[in-house]
Image: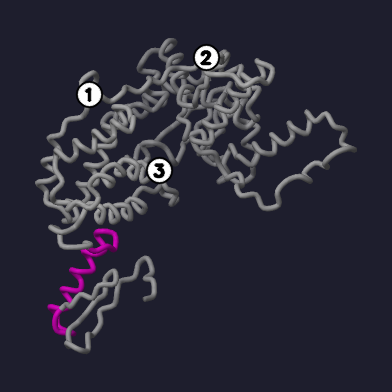
Amino acid sequence: MPKLKENSLPAYRLHRQSGQAIVTLNGHDVLLGVFGSAASKAEYRRRTAEWLSIGRQLPPAPVQDATIAELMRLYKTHCDVYYRRPDGEPTGEADKIGMALKPLRLLYGPTTANEFGPVKLKAVREAMIKLGWCRGMINQAIGRVRRFVKWCVENEYLHASILQALQAVAPLKVGRCAARESEPVKPVDDDVIEATLPFLTPTVAAMVQLQRLTGARPGEICAMRVGEVDHSGEIWKYRPTQHKTAHHNIERLIHIGPKAQVVLRPFLLKLDPTAYVFSPTDSLNEMRQQRAESRKTPRSCGNVAGSNRQRKPKRKPGESYDTFSYRRAIARACDAANQWAYGGMVIGNDERIIPRWHPHQLRHSAATEIRRQFGLEAAQHVLGHASMDMAEVYAEKNADIARNVMAKIG
């Protein structure tokens, strides 16, 4: 059967054996009534409209017979399409949903979906505790399980009473459950940052310095493009198109002060406004240059520069960093700094001079300094933590406060 185009509909056809109209949806033939009649055409419009509304899908079985695993497959198709940025890139939420639903599938995949209830949900939660997940992560995962059930109710795969019953399961409370507590994210000392920078490539080092000065989120630093930075005024403005609250139609404005401008300016020389400011390709070239400069063998001896590279490497550097690669680069730099301090020896965690830290701690460091110097309200505005209800009311005020703060410390 030929694949349908994105905006096309299955054909309204004649079923010769019965003389009825027919339409084929997901490989299933649906009879509509007498071919050519107004009633059959109305039925065709109704069936195709319902089919489109649930992502070009049909119920895998009658509602009372569908299993949880069958509905999860349909939900995965929905998530892969729905959780995307305006440019079509996945947001990562679909992967988080898949991880949250895994214990549900392992315990109750073959179970009829309409048999699912609060007791079974609590059993899924206990399985998450045994996996070693922290309390906050478990509460978020249970929320994603409820979201899956809500989607099933919305598309008439499940009865609404199931979702109502699941609302009775309260979230895990501090000190009243067996789930472990996660370690709070703490600021990283500036001395630790300075000791790590020499072991980072210039590109990643600039990302670290820029994030520390502006308090931006790691993802906002990774996704920065040349054309998104307005450097016409005394205080530069960065308006990321991809950020945490973009799907709420909230604008994120990051002000870049004089110190951060010095860090950022060399990376804005790219001619393509859609190019990422910080590129792993640039970082790889910088690493190779560092190795070439530290080479002890004379250039007339040994391998010629570039001669020992793979022609078809399994992995090539991407166009931009993501939060995982950014975090991994910092962790490796921390390890390299400690090995250098101990003369190249492999050391344990207790012997570390420089503790491992991650990009989210930079944001906390910036927030701590801004709050200490300018107060809690200033930290809230600079970091973009204004509530959704008050974002429009305080938009101008937030910009003024953030601009003044960055002019002094950024």
Q: Is residue 273 magenta?
A: no
Above or below, 231 relative to 273: above
- Dot 2: few (<14), some (14–19), or many (≥20) neighbours within 10 Å? few
Q: Which residues are magenta?
A: 33-58
Question: Is 165 situated left or right of 223 in this image?
Answer: left
Q: Which mark is residue 92?
A: 3
Above or below, 155 relative to 33: above
Main SS, magenta region, reads helix
Give the secondary structure at mark 1: loop
Tell me the CA gap for discs 2 and 3: 34 Å
Mark 2 and mark 3 lie on one chain; the one further toward the N terminus is: 3
Q: Are marks 2 and 3 in contact (CB under 8 Å)?
A: no
* Numbered disc total: 3
Q: Which mark is residue 149?
A: none
Q: Which mark is residue 177?
A: 1
Mark 1 and mark 2 lie on one chain; the one further toward the N terminus is: 1
Three-letter code for the amino acid on which mark 2 is drawn: Asp
Three-letter code for the amino acid on which mark 3 is drawn: Gly
- The spot of residue 142 in percent (x, y) is 25, 37
Three-letter code for the amino acid on which mark 1 is drawn: Cys
Give the secondary structure at mark 2: helix
**Residue tagged by mark 2?**
350
Q: Quadrant of residue 3?
A: bottom left
Q: Quadrant of residue 376?
A: top left
Give the secondary structure at mark 3: loop
Tell me the CA gap for discs 1 and 2: 30 Å
- Dot 1: few (<14), some (14–19), or many (≥20) neighbours within 10 Å? few
The residue at the far left in this view is: 161
